């Protein structure tokens, strides 16, 4: 990892799923953000991706999450000396407290599938907050093929409602279909990001180990979509 604050121990302590920094590095590979740009990190969890963005590009990050209290993230950002560059916020993606046209970029790693499944979510909720041409990039857990029912061997691990959130590259490409210069792909970092998560002693990581072994590379993937916000008429 290029980012000095994110030691392996700090990463392991704060991961909430497959290594989000590993995922973000691939998601933004070849992209540049200019110092001082405002970036929305939506569903940032414990803020690993926010830290990476702030340090990598010297941008101002708005680290928004629902399950993790803003105070907890604020303390973490202070510890790293990044409290001046990352604004921690406790908010629901469905009720974001920002001005229209505020952000130069938006990223979301391993979170968008919780709130962005409906076709109107991006145009109704996210697009208004972005400047024209804002870099927009999401990465979500997904499926290699569309799947209606949980395969028998996966029933100990997956509920039908989980399956509803895990969709294919084509599905997510359609949900973000208004982005210009759009690229959608199955992420190459899948194995590494998952291996790094499962190596932690987080109880969720421990319980994910048999699930991944049973999946055996058959069903799950990570889906990325990246592009630029098209003109917005309001
Ligand atoms: C699996 S965690 C991933 C966190 C982080 N992005 C990472 O990869 O480490 C999913 C995150 O999505 C956030 N989330 C779920 N629903 C949300 C919503 N409606 N609004 C904002 N965040 C939400 C949760 O708070 C949680 O931190």
Image (cartoon, helix red, strand yellow):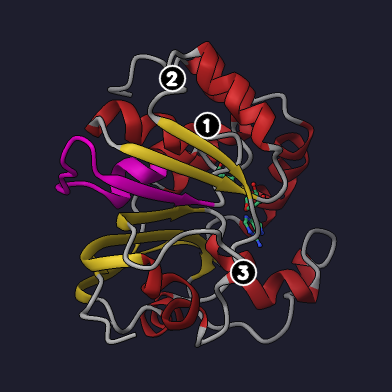
Depth check, front residue: 52 or 89: 89
**Residue 218 seen in this snapshot:** no
Labels 2, 3: front one: 3
Real-space Cα distance between discs 3 and 1? 31 Å
Q: Is residue 197 above or below residue 122?
A: above
Q: Earlier along the polypeptide chain: callout 2 or callout 3? A: 2
Residue placed at 72% from the left, 69% from the top?
162
- For label 1, count other residues whose C-alpha is less than 10 Å away and answer few (under 14), some (14-19) or many (20+): some
Depth check, front residue: 203 or 210: 203
Asked if residue 170 lies in the magenta stretch, the reply is no
Residue 163 image-quadrant placement? bottom right
Screen quadrant of the C terminus? bottom left
Q: Is residue 54 above or below residue 233?
A: above
The image's mark for residue 94 is 3
Real-space Cα distance between discs 1 and 2? 14 Å
Depth check, front residue: 94 or 44: 94
Residue underneath mark 2: 6
Residue underneath mark 1: 196
Asked if labels 3 and 2 touch by Cβ distance under 8 angstroms, the answer is no
Q: For disc 3, does the CB lie below 8 Å from ligand 1?
A: yes
Report the span colored magenta: 23-42
- For label 2, count other residues whose C-alpha is less than 10 Å away and answer few (under 14), some (14-19) or many (20+): some
Residue placed at 65% from the left, 59% from the top?
92
From the viewer's perspective, is 54 left or right of 171? Answer: left
């Amino acid at each position: 990892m290029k980012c000095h604050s994110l030691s392996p121990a700090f990463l392991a302590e704060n991961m909430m799923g497959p290594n989000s920094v590993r995922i973000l590095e691939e998601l933004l590979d070849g992209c540049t953000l200019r110092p001082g740009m405002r970036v929305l990190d939506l569903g940032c969890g414990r803020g690993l991706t926010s830290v990476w963005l702030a340090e990598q590009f010297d941008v101002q990050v708005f680290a928004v999450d629902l399950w993790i209290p803003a105070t907890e993230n604020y303390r973490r950002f202070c510890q790293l000396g990044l409290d001046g560059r990352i604004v921690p916020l406790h908010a629901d993606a469905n009720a974001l407290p920002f001005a229209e046209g505020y952000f130069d970029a938006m990223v979301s790693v391993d979170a968008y599938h919780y709130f962005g499944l409906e076709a109107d979510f991006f145009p109704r909720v996210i697009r208004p907050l972005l400047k024209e041409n804002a870099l927009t990039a999401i990465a979500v857990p997904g499926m290699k093929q569309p799947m209606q029912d949980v395969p028998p061997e996966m029933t100990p691990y997956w509920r039908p409602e989980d399956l509803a959130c895990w969709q294919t590259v084509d599905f997510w490409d359609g949900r973000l279909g208004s982005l210009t210069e759009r690229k959608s792909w199955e992420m190459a970092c899948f194995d590494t990001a998952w291996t790094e998560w499962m190596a932690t002693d987080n109880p969720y990581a421990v319980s994910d180990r048999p699930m991944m072994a049973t999946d055996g590379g058959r069903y799950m993937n990570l889906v990325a979509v990246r592009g630029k916000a098209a003109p917005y008429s309001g």
